[in-house]
Image (spheres, rainbow, N blue to C red):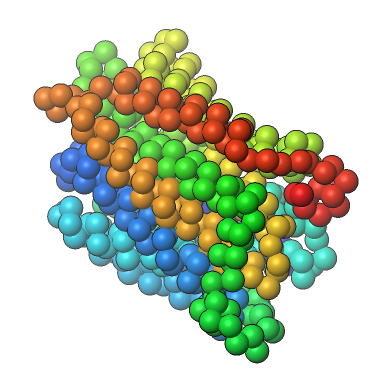
Amino acid sequence: MTIKQRLKIMIFLQFFIWGCWLVTLGSYMINTLQFSGSQVGAVYGSSGLASLIMPSLIGVIADRWMKANRLYGICHFLGAICLFIAAQTSDPTVMFWVMFFNAMVFIPTISLSYTISYIGLEKEGLDTTKEFPSVRVYGTVSFILAMWIISLGGFELSNIQLYIAAGAAILLALFSFVLPDCPTSNVKKDKSLVSHLGLDAFVLFKQKKMAIFFVFAMLIGAALQINLAFADPFLHDFALNPDYKDSLAVKYPAILLSIGQFSEVVFILAIPFFLRKFGIKTVMLLSMAAWTVRFGLLAFGDPNGLGFILLLLSMIAYGAAFDFFNISGSMFVDKEVDHRIRGSAQGLFMTMVNGLGAYLGAVISGKIVDYLTVDGVKDWQNIWLVFAAYTIVLGILFAISFKYKNNRDTVNHVNKVT
């Protein structure tokens, strides 16, 4: 196999693992294990806590001491063990800690997979800006496949989803042995404390543009975590209404949500065009606008008639909401930083999005859901409208504070934003 083919398989398995449980675990915890909104938020927030340190730390190790592809396999093996234990857990406190440890080893593998991809594509003499989206799209395809398997198999409210994820993690750990070698940095004589601790990427915060970018990446990450924790439970709650019990949205909510991943496929392939044409600021603003549309449509959607069309449109909006900040942001960071710290820079980006952002989004949204729940009935319309208002404010603040000029000649050459 060529390096690019191996990267596609790596990305496919990477996101298959996540797709098995990320969207549906909330429903399993609420409906089967009877967790509260705050407890579900805490479990999802555990990934945020783990991401405060681990992506940057793992990125530093990959930059300086261990080849990223070897470290990648070790992390997935440990993650498989955690998922297997989580499948046998019914206590909210134990579930929190098990998923916390899983996040400590899984979340860093996302940025590692990107770093391995960028290095592997460069080894083949390929332009990462043009070629990475065609690799990354395999992750979206596998995420969709995982969601369909879980939903059609009737595993959305079952721990089987965690067992399947654990099996895929073992497979990817073994596959890591055939991934392209990723050299560590040759710069090892720098005696500064910052360099020895591997905190080089934090120097990026000295650049006003990058500091603002990372802060808003964190805040958009909160919106993503809100969606992940509560979109599937929201659809499952329609089963309480006899008029909706036989609808597609109630029987197979994960399949309906997977339309968002189909939408991702289209928007991922459109990223190079949007970055070259408009630059990162406009792309990020489009993401925030898409999150507002996503939450607003969920507020007024239901499984029948016009309401179902609104739900479908919200799934399409999700593709732009996710890709235009998550994938574009990663590519932007890779092109902006010194390649000697690309691993730790990707780790820092992941820390802001899936660390601080994920933790704040999960915990605060869990409290909002509980606050807007009366006698066990959740006021989903107002819940989603609160989240939509949040992303509107976010977009306005970003448009005002992020100063950016899109140099088309530079972008067309190396996608370098100035």
Residue at screen point 21% across, 30% down: 371
Residue lying furthest right? 409
Above or below, 205 relative to 417: below
Taking the image as shown, residue 35 lies to the left or right of residue 282, namely left
Foreground pick, 275 / 91:
275
Residue lying furthest top? 306
Q: Is residue 169 visible?
A: no
Foreground pick, 227 / 164:
227
**Where residue 176 sits in the image (x, y, percent)?**
55, 72
Taking the image as shown, residue 280 lies to the left or right of residue 93, namely right
**Where residue 17 sits in the image (x, y, percent)?**
44, 56
Above or below, 278 relative to 11: above
Residue at screen point 18% across, 53% down: 92
Query: Quarter of the image containing the N terminus?
Result: bottom right
**Where residue 290 sits in the image (x, y, percent)?**
55, 29
Residue at screen point 64% across, 80% down: 184
